[in-house]
Image (cartoon, rainbow, N blue to C red):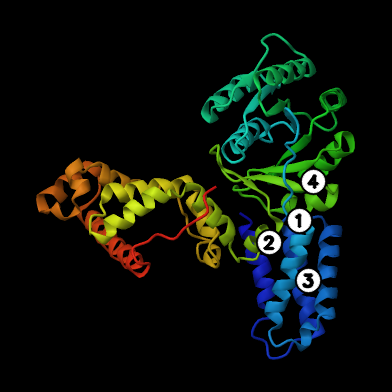
Amino acid sequence: MFENLSSKIEKALHTLRGKGSITDINIAETVKEVRKALLDADVSYPIAKEFTDKVKAEALGRNVIQSIEPGQLMVKIVHEKLTELMGSQAVDINIKGQPAVILIAGLQGSGKTTFSAKLAHYLKSKKGRSVMLVAGDVYRPAAISQLQTLGEQVQVPVYTEEGNRNPVEIAKHAINEAKGRGYNIVIVDTAGRLAVDEEMMNEIAALKRELQPQETLFVVDSMTGQDAVNTAKAFNDRIDFDGVVLTKLDGDTRGGAALTIRYTVNKPIKFVGVGEKMDALDVFHPDRMANRILGMGDVVSLVERAQEQYDEMEARKISKKLMHNEYNFEDFLSQLAQIKKMGSIKDLVGMIPGMSKLTKDVEISDDAFKPIEAIIGSMTPYERQHPSCLNGSRKQRIAEGSGRSIQELNRFLKQFDDTRKMMKMVSKQGGGKMPKMRRR
């Protein structure tokens, strides 16, 4: 996420670090490099220039030249201005109403249908709401079946009307159905449309006018860069949406849309899609995104994800096992599963301060744990529960069964033993008690 932008801005700011004297010229050069980094990220020139002019004015106003640590102060100023550019603070979705109606709009191929299901999962699992999805895309042949499949995955009902080609009618009927069945929220997925297609734009405008939704969200593919910003403006002029959703932010995106869409349409980014899984949806926090762009990581989001998967009872059980030297491969596999639920490995590593730079050119695959899972999967139940029983013949059988070499197996066993010792040490320092964490 934003790797190129991050490295270029960091390089620009690095020129001020460690210098004995800072001058107007140094600051001007740094600001120029930051502007180039923004332009390369597909930020429009007027916005990039206005942004860097503000940074320069702020730097001179805060006497960066006389500062003992001008490099750090410049990073702080750039962070503040990036956060401001992206909206300053997170804005919550409006789900008041009985039922609350959420209308989803956007271009063809922007990821509306997938987002609709992700949002349903988010509102159901994290907000405790009962949700109904509505298949309002009557033009794309696979749209209805796709939404039904995704609805099954997140265990949310999908309202459809076979043969009806009027999305306004379908949505109205769905809302009445939701009222009768006591659903809190209705999410209406709609057909993708181009801003230049007058007939389709009239249709989405009619949907908003007739349904009077509590929330209208515009879904945009962040990989389309500045074009996404221009399209968002055209849609906002027509339907006056309430917020933006950026999809595919985990892809090879230059970041221009995420940085400037808030500034251009004066509407907040509310969610970002960060993967293909149904739980790969994050609330957008401008300050945290600025942290990541500047290579500072995002520890708060990392902790929040950990808390979502944290099982206090299981943690206490493992702590007790560690104290009695009973921690085994099944416990290890269980914890591995919890880590995988938190999201893509590369995304998690990027949330750790400084790690995004270290792993910039390193390919971190979500399949990284598969060799370990294959090794443990090749063990008998007894072997998984009794790590100390693994002798030469057992190791040979496990290596052959998992398709790994004896050297790889021994390396894993040593890592497992080291991990167990470290965890036991931490558990002892905590008096055998696991720290309390807020459950979500």
Q: What element carries label 3?
A: helix
In the picture, the disc for residue 290 is 2
Establish if 394 lies above or below 18.
Answer: above
In the picture, the disc for residue 86 is 1
Separation of residues labelled 1 and 2 (CA atoms): 8 Å
Choose the circle earlier in sequence order: 2 or 3: 3
Q: What element carries label 4?
A: helix
Where does label 4 land, which residue? 229
Choose the circle earlier in sequence order: 2 or 4: 4
Position of residue 169 in the picture relative to residue 328 (left or right): right
The amino acid type, in three-letter code, at marker 1 is Met
Badge 4 density bin: few <14, some 14–19, many ≥20, Cα 10 Å = many
Where does label 3 land, which residue? 32
> Which is more foreground, mark 3 or mark 1?
1
Badge 2 vs badge 4, beta-carbon distance below 8 Å:
no
Work out whether residue 310 or residue 352 is closer to the camera in this orientation and state it: 310
| Image quarter in which the N terminus is found | bottom right
Separation of residues labelled 2 and 4 (CA atoms): 19 Å
**Taking the image as drawn, is residue 50 in sight?**
yes
Establish if 133 lies above or below 177.
Answer: below
Residue drawn at 23 percent across, 59 percent down: 324
Q: Position of residue 211 (x, y in %)?
A: 81, 24
Position of residue 202 in the picture relative to residue 357 (left or right): right
Badge 1 vs badge 2, beta-carbon distance below 8 Å:
yes
Separation of residues labelled 1 and 4 (CA atoms): 13 Å
